[in-house]
Image (cartoon, rainbow, N blue to C red):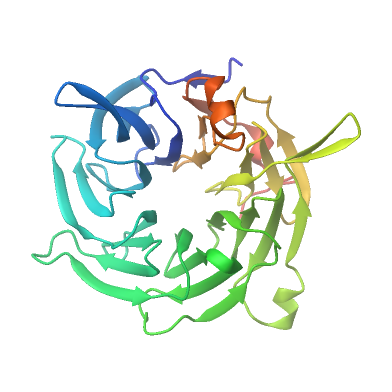
């Protein structure tokens, strides 16, 4: 595929998250399980790798003691990470120094940075979301209890969507965290695996382990709620047997408000949620796709490709080495009849 590159120096084990810089369209973070040398002994642990995708160069690597499940940028020179070791870390992308901001009491599953509030927001299996100010002498600013484990979070403007176990969703205004603005149950019958907010601030999409995507809107009015819907995807019939794969990741295009979905079937598709149509399915990758991300100007799509353990230990024996691809995207991500708005 001439429209994409494969990054040099990928992780050695499963990719958990790929995230582009909010300001630099060529800077990418990738978090992972990984092989790390501690005292000259290689152990399975975790890393965050920082890439310049234009130069196809790994600029920095941050070793962690356990798998990293989440990462995000704050600005051009700083990023954050969290994972199975429960520590919230600030990463200096220039000096490669790591600053420990604090801890959760269980694994950190998701994180977002609010540039408006200059605040890092972390979600954990300990059933809390926590707010951090990296500049403060005591970085943890607040902790908010939830009824279930946090699986995913996403942020648009001041609206934070939190996807939890038991198919629960809380929607918050981050300026008023004393209680959720809305409490919802997923439209999908199975566990939430993916979540992404629309860049226009109108709503969000979720994906489940059972090959379905739901499109929902924040406005609680009956007219807005009539527009929500769900559809089947990442499925295939082979020899009259229906195969269903998890939807692992969703990403909205920052300009066109269309979105991409990635599944354990190794495919990435582009959807126009307003016309309820698939615009493109890219050629299949040779392994599941656990994470995808558009860059800030919408010209590139990062695709993390690695084994996602659906086949257990047996599948791991024959799994391909992880890879990260960066696709150049074109008109296939535009809605039909796009005139700009």
Residue depicted at x 24% and y 53%: 87
- Residue 218 image position (x, y, % from top left): 59, 73
Q: Is residue 258 visible?
A: yes
Q: Is residue 339 left or right of residue 55?
A: right
Q: Residue furthest front?
A: 314
Residue depicted at x 14% and y 48%: 99
User: Residue 307, located in which quarter of the rendered image?
Assistant: top right
Image quarter (top left, top right, bottom left or bottom right) of the C terminus: bottom right
User: Residue 236, located in which quarter of the rendered image?
Assistant: top right
Q: Is residue 141 left or right of residue 107?
A: left
Q: Residue furthest top?
A: 2
- Residue 301 image position (x, y, % from top left): 52, 34
Q: Is residue 117 visible?
A: no
Asked if residue 329 is positioned above or below residue 89 in the image, the reply reads above
Asked if residue 287 is positioned above or below residue 204 in the image, the reply reads above
Front in this rendered view, residue 168 or 229: 168
Front in this rendered view, residue 173 or 244: 244
- Residue 339 image position (x, y, % from top left): 68, 48
User: Residue 267, located in which quarter of the rendered image?
Assistant: top right
Residue depicted at x 50% and y 73%: 171
- Residue 222 image position (x, y, % from top left): 73, 82
Q: Is residue 136 left or right of residue 297?
A: left
Image quarter (top left, top right, bottom left or bottom right) of the N terminus: top right
Residue depicted at x 35% and y 77%: 175
Q: How many marks?
A: 0
């Amino acid at each position: 595929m001439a429209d994409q590159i494969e990054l040099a120096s990928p992780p050695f084990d499963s990719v958990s998250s790929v995230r582009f810089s909010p300001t630099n369209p060529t800077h990418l973070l990738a978090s992972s399980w990984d092989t790390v040398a501690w005292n000259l002994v290689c152990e399975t642990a975790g890393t965050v790798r920082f890439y310049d995708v234009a130069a196809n160069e790994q600029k920095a690597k941050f070793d962690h003691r356990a798998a990293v499940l989440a990462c995000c940028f704050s600005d051009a020179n700083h990023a954050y990470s969290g994972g199975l070791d429960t520590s919230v870390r600030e990463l200096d992308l220039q000096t490669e120094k790591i600053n420990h901001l604090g801890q959760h009491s269980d694994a950190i599953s998701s994180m977002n940075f609010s540039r408006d509030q200059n605040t890092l927001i972390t979600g954990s299996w300990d059933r809390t979301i926590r707010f951090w100010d990296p500049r403060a002498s005591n970085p943890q600013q607040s902790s908010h209890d939830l009824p279930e484990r946090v699986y995913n979070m996403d942020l648009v403007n001041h609206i934070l969507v939190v996807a939890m176990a038991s198919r629960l969703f809380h929607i918050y205004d981050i300026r008023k965290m004393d209680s959720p603005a809305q409490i919802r149950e997923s439209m999908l019958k199975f566990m939430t695996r993916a979540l992404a907010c629309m860049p226009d601030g109108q709503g969000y999409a979720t994906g489940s382990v059972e090959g379905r995507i739901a499109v929902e809107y924040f406005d609680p009015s009956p007219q807005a709620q009539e527009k929500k819907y769900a559809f089947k995807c990442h499925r295939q019939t082979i020899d009259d047997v229906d195969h269903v794969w998890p939807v692992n990741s969703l990403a909205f295009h920052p300009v066109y408000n269309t979105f991409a979905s990635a599944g354990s079937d190794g495919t990435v598709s582009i959807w126009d949620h307003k016309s309820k149509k698939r615009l493109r399915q890219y050629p299949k990758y040779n392994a599941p796709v656990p994470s995808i991300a558009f860059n800030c100007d919408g010209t590139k799509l990062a695709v993390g490709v690695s084994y996602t353990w659906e086949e257990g230990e047996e599948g791991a024996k024959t799994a391909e080495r992880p890879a990260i691809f960066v696709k150049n995207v074109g008109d296939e991500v535009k809605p039909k009849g796009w005139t700009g708005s």
